[in-house]
Image (cartoon, grey):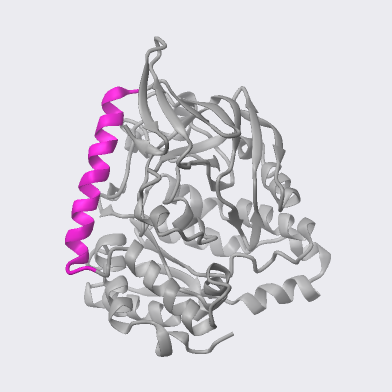
Amino acid sequence: MRKHPAKDVIDPDMLDRLAALAVKVGVNLQPGQDLLLSAPVEALPLVRRIADHAYAAGAGLVTPLLSDPEIALSRYRHGQDASFDRAAGWLYEGMGKAFDENTARMGIVGEDPMLLAEQDADKVGRVNKANSLAYSPARERITRFDINWNLVAWPGSAWARRVFPDLSEDDAVRRLADAIFAASRVDGGDPVAAWEAHNATLRERSDWLNGQAFHALHFTGPGTDLTVGLADGHEWMGGASVARNGVVCNPNIPSEEVFTTPHAQRVEGYVRSTKPLSHMGSLIDDIRVRFEGGRIVEAHASKGEAVLHKVLDTDEGARRLGEVALVPHGSPISQSGLLFYNTLFDENAACHIALGQCYSKCFRDGDTLDADAVASRGGNTSAIHIDWMIGSAEIDIDGVHEDGRRVPVFRKGEWV
């Protein structure tokens, strides 16, 4: 692993722009607000710049949590068998307490998407399940949008080699960095203005969908004939969102999606993934599932099927949907022609669905709803929330009203 790739090949001005955008537009850190920041240790140059901009913006306390791939692999090489069913619940309980005290959340992605691909699938599945269950105190506050939060990306060297396997490590990191900067809209004259314009476009699309108030969406295409019922009183969102603490943030940078909450009991048919899913260091490809009564009753994958089955067995809600999102095939990330092997990017190249926990924010008056009210409207509950891509240039989508009237929404992967 390289020690200091940023020093050599990543444009320092662009990196600083990304850090500033993450603080000012992404998490929109407020004066006096604390920030909890997680990142791979290789991303320390970006972490330092984010901390610098955060304190300049008046941050109370910036607390970084760093992860290391070699330490993760040591567990699989030498860990006792019982350790694979454990997770640091005390840490996630502390994160939940921090969020209750209005600490903002930021995550930097950039890990090797296939770090655990050669490890025992059963152990990987057990670790994923333990982490998912233990993370619930933090995740539930994020999915409720209790606090302002944001994800951005760092061009990790192992990740870069996956995306650009034919390039040298330096060239691969440079190419991935440039792709991240372009997708994050920091390579133009005024990144803040660019995001204001982009958020306005996403809001127009959300407003149109909310005006239609569809009962369901019908997806058709190769290997796909899927009807996704929409939760009662659902609300479409996209781009900038108002957290329950009143702060407007952009949770994902980049983001090209508008999304809402499906009805957990009203999903029928079959669907096939259009891009690989990178999940917790494993790659799951060519996912094919069939739904009955909202629940996945049959699931296959050409690669990583054992890991997929472990994910689906996490809990009852893991086999039901918590999100449906619309992304045009013509999105900048899709048109880049790159497969990022990273959900933050690949989900913004294609329409997608998510297994597991719903976003309770995606309801009319969502800020006022408790867990029972969300469930009564069809919202799903689970210890996981995993997005995977089902969109392409061959996918059509119709909006279906409760009386059966159909309205074209997408044709051949594009907004009608």
State whether residue 27 appears in this view.
no
Magenta segment, which residues?
188-213
**Relative image position of residue 96 (x, y in whole percent):** 47, 56
Q: Residue at x 71, y 52 (%)?
A: 303
Main secondary structure of the magenta stretch: helix
Looking at the image, the residue that sits furthest to the top is 403
Q: Residue at x 32, y 40 (%)?
A: 237
**Relative image position of residue 204 (x, y in whole percent):** 22, 38
The foreground one among 35 and 331 is 331
The answer to whether 400 appears left or right of 20 in the picture is right
The answer to whether 54 appears left or right of 383 in the picture is left
Q: Quadrant of the C terminus?
A: top left
As for residue 16 lying within the magenta part, the answer is no
Q: Quadrant of the N terminus?
A: bottom right
Query: Taking 388 as reference, is 81 above or below it?
Result: below
Q: Residue at x 65, y 46 (%)?
A: 286
The answer to whether 121 appears left or right of 393 in the picture is right
The answer to whether 367 appears left or right of 339 in the picture is left
Disc count in the image? 0
**Relative image position of residue 381 (x, y in whole percent):** 55, 37
As for residue 210 lying within the magenta part, the answer is yes
Q: Quadrant of residue 20?
A: bottom left
State whether residue 211 appears in this view.
yes
The foreground one among 406 and 121 is 406
Q: Residue at x 49, y 77 (%)?
A: 172
**Relative image position of residue 324 (x, y in whole percent):** 46, 37
Q: Quadrant of residue 214?
A: top left
